[in-house]
Image: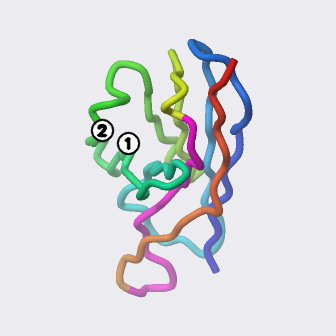
Amino acid sequence: QVQLVESGGGLVQPGGSLRLSCAASGTIFSINAMGWYRQAQGKQRELVAAVTSGGGTNWADSVKGRFTITRDHAKNTVYLQMNSLKPEDTAVYYCNADLTSNGTPPMRYWGKGTLVTVSS
């Protein structure tokens, strides 16, 4: 079994910062990529940022220059540092990981999400 557990969400004022963490646990052979998606109320889930095992990154234009994604390979953990937060960043943030477990083909796993609210 594989689990992804997010932490670090909460309420922050506009212009503030938050750091999200996501740790993958269980029987994991290799992780190809880890990333973050978000879903605001009434909207579709969208990519925020992702990082591959080789360090390549993919970003949503709306967060470029404000958010940073990093990965700790030894801990199977990915972080999302969010700075200069805006009310439009309010959403449930979901972690995902494309990984191989028990010799099966790579699959995408999801966390349960953590709520980020940007409001004064």
Three-letter code, disc 1: Ala
Q: Disc count in the image? A: 2
Residue 7 located left or right of residue 104? right
To which residue does mark 2 refer? 59
Task: State the separation of the CA atoms marked 1 and 2.
Answer: 4 Å
Look at label 2 and name its amino acid.
Trp
Magenta stretch, overall SS: strand
**Residue in the foreground of this view, choosing between 79 and 100:** 79
Quadrant placement of the C terminus: top right
In magenta stretch: residue 96: yes
**Is residue 44 positioned above or below 79 on the image?**
below
Find residue 106 and report its image quarter. bottom left
Give the structural element (helix, strand or loop) at label 2. strand
Residue 69 rendering spot, x and y as whole percentages: 44, 34
| Quadrant (top left, top right, bottom left, bottom right) of the N terminus | bottom right
Magenta region: which residues?
Answer: 90-104
The relative height of residue 88 versus residue 31 in the rendered view (above or below) is above
In the rendered image, the vertical position of residue 10 relative to residue 105, given as above or below: above
Does residue 4 appear left or right of residue 36 in this picture? right
Q: Earlier in the sequence, mark 1 or mark 2?
A: 1
Whether 111 is among the magenta residues is no
- The residue singled out by tag 1 in the image is 49
Contact check, label 1 and label 2, Cβ < 8 Å: yes
